[in-house]
Amino acid sequence: MLDKPYKFRKASVSCDMTRPFIKQIIKYVFQLDDITEKKYIYIVEAELYDYNIYAIKYYPKVLKQHKYKYNILTEQHKANRIIATCMHIIFDIVNRDPFANIGFLASRTSDALGDYKEELRLTKRFRIYAQAFIDFFGPKTYSHFPDKNTSTYLLINNKNNVQEIKKCSEDMFTKIYPGLFSR
């Protein structure tokens, strides 16, 4: 599945002082080079939170201003290569930061109006990302904390104090997303 990522590059690093717990946002970009009729660019944001937690988000550049940019399917049928690219970006982050922890919230699929087509529990994206994490991040180096009810996943680097980071991350993300974790 991850054998043909798109070529990507780091585009920018910025700080967002308006959001709690976040230290910086690292943006990567890549282009779908197998779509020839027009340029189709994706943006990957690696949000760096306290405790070296990187939350990975991505969306097509054409949806940058759209409220549901993380939820809408593009019908490009390039999911394998897009996910492979995101995984390779994660590998790049882990190589640069040996204490990096990785998290994601697998968005629910919706239409352009925001009508969800799936429940929050075990989204299609969650199942795909979770399998990729299991395949590429072994238990010797990372502790895995999937939450099927919220379609979230946290990989904690075993070089860190796993239980402390798990507790602190739960507290932090409950404050950031109170409606998500209060279910």
Image (cartoon, rainbow, N blue to C red):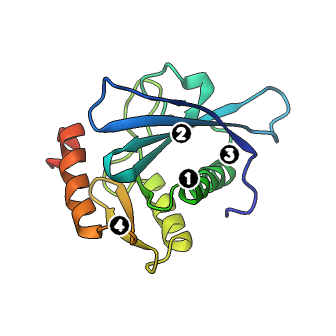
Query: Which residue bears the numbered disc 2?
Result: 58
Q: Which mark is residue 93?
A: 1
Question: At x 46% / y 64%, what residue is drawn?
Answer: 130
Asked if residue 113 can be seen in this view, the reply is: yes
Query: Which residue bears the numbered disc 3?
Result: 77
Q: Please tell me how crowded label 1 is: few (under 14), some (14-19), or many (20+) other residues with Cα within 10 Å.
A: some
The image quadrant of residue 179 is top left
Q: CA distance from mark 1 to mark 2?
A: 15 Å
Which residue reaches farthest right? 36
Q: Please tell me how crowded label 2 is: few (under 14), some (14-19), or many (20+) other residues with Cα within 10 Å.
A: many
Three-letter code for the amino acid on which mark 2 is drawn: Tyr
Report the front residue among 140 and 5: 140
Query: Which residue bears the numbered disc 4?
Result: 160
Question: If you read the primary sequence from the N terminus, does the residue marked by circle 3 or circle 4 appear first?
Answer: 3
Question: At x 84% / y 28%, what residue is drawn?
Answer: 37
Question: If you read the primary sequence from the N terminus, does the residue marked by circle 3 or circle 1 appear first?
Answer: 3
